[in-house]
């Protein structure tokens, strides 16, 4: 009987603590809500400005570098195509020279 009463007391104390905790949380949320509703918002001061000029210069530098890399890749592609064309021409010339050499004996 005493153990049952101890268990019931512990159970009720735990339930009371849970109830008090939930009530405290609810009151805290209501206080915060009221503070937000009562707050007057103002514009930002100059301490929160973003240095746009530096960012724009950095972005422009990145774009220039990107364009430069595109130009380099384009130049490399043109050079490779020129080398391929030269190879085809040289192979054709080699074949003609071998044909002439074969005809002359």
Image: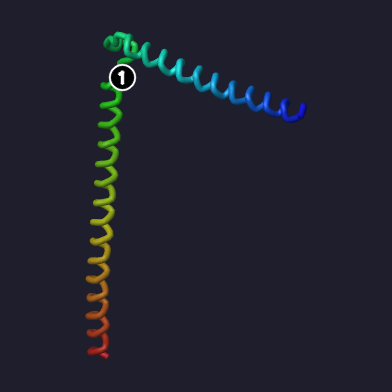
Identity of the residue drawn at 26% across and 66% down? 84
Dividing the picture into quadrants, the one containing residue 102 is bottom left
**Where, quadrant-wise, is the C terminus in this rendering?**
bottom left
Q: Is residue 87 above or below residue 59?
A: below
In the rendered structure, the answer to whether residue 49 lies left or right of residue 6 reads: left
Q: Is residue 32 above or below residue 76?
A: above
Identity of the residue drawn at 49% across and 19% down? 23
In the rendered structure, the answer to whether residue 65 lies left or right of residue 13 reads: left
Q: Determine the secondary structure under disc 1.
A: loop
Identity of the residue drawn at 29% across and 38% down? 65
**Residue placed most toward the observer, 56 or 12:** 12
Q: Position of residue 103 (x, y in %)?
A: 23, 89
Is the image coloured rainbow, by chain, by secondary structure, or in one colour?
Answer: rainbow
**Residue placed most toward the observer, 76 or 14:** 14
Q: Which residue is mark 1?
A: 50
**Residue placed most toward the observer, 91 or 25:** 25
Identity of the residue drawn at 28% across and 50% down? 73
Q: Position of residue 93 (x, y in %)?
A: 23, 75
**Where, quadrant-wise, is the N terminus in this rendering?**
top right
Dividing the picture into quadrants, the one containing residue 104 is bottom left
Furthest toward the right, the residue is 2
Q: Position of residue 31 (x, y in %)?
A: 41, 13
Q: Is residue 78 above or below residue 30?
A: below
Q: Position of residue 12 (x, y in %)?
A: 63, 24
């Amino acid at each position: 009987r005493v153990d049952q009463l101890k268990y019931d007391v512990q159970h009720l104390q735990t339930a009371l603590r849970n109830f008090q905790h939930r009530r405290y949380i609810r009151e805290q949320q209501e206080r915060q809500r009221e503070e937000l509703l009562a707050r007057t918002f103002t514009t930002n001061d100059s301490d929160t400005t973003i240095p746009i000029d530096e960012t724009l210069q950095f972005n422009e530098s990145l774009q220039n570098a990107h364009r430069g890399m595109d130009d380099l890749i384009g130049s490399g592609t043109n050079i490779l195509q020129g080398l391929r064309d030269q190879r085809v021409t040289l192979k054709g010339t080699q074949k003609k020279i071998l044909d002439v050499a074969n005809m002359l004996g």
